[in-house]
Image: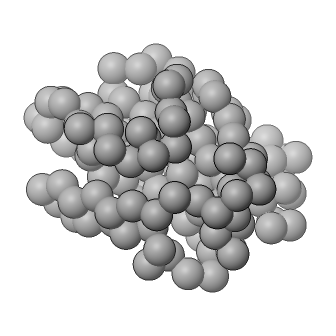
Amino acid sequence: MIGQRAPDFSVRDSDRSVHLADIKDKVIVLNFWATWCPPCVEEIPSLAVMQSQLQDRVQVVAVSIDEDPEAYHRFLQEHGIQFLTVRDPQRKSPDLYGTFGWPETYIIDRRGIIRRKFIGAVDWTNPDMLEYLKTL
């Protein structure tokens, strides 16, 4: 998938909807995660900090695969999640990407091309990562 156009998708949950193609002129950090996944929980704070620091050029789109809406909403509230997240318990969007590990993250450039894929927790505040995202 690296170097290919990112598969488009729409997800609507009880709080909001996301249509990937609607995000224009920003690098997308597409993160598939779950509240019950320790590495996912580990990387959430650095995703939030990175989104705050690069909000003019990067958009985090976090897609939770949680089946339990109460656990998902409780997690968002307890952790003060401010970046864009939706819940896709049927896993339709991760299936488009062939996702099999959690968390799994795709970096999509401003033209919609997948540039990198990460399986496992990432420190999104690492200076090298921040610099890489600024170059896209």
Q: What residue is rendered at 50% in x and 33% in y?
A: 99
Rendered view: 35 above or below 18: above
Q: Quadrant of the C terminus?
A: bottom right
Note whether residue 75 is visible.
no
**From this viewpoint, which residue is outermost toward the bottom?**
25
Q: Is residue 41 left or right of residue 128?
A: left
Q: Position of residue 78 (x, y in %)?
A: 28, 37
Q: Which color scheme does this rendered protein use?
A: one colour
Q: Is residue 109 above or below residue 88?
A: below
> Going by the image, does 46 lie left or right of 109?
left
Q: Position of residue 6 (x, y in %)?
A: 59, 59
Q: Is residue 127 above or below residue 123?
A: below
Residue 1 visible in the shown view? yes
What x and y, as percent, mark residue 126? 79, 41
Name the side, left or right, on which 127 lies relative to 64.
right
Q: Say which residue appears at 62% left-offset and 25% top-offset.
A: 120
Residue 10 x %, y %: 32, 63
Left or right, 129 with reference to 92: right
Q: In the rendered view, tell whether residue 32 sits above or below residue 111.
A: above
Dividing the picture into quarters, in which one does residue 43 lie?
top right
Residue in the image at 55% along x and 65% along y: 59
Q: Depth check: 19 or 85 in front?
A: 19
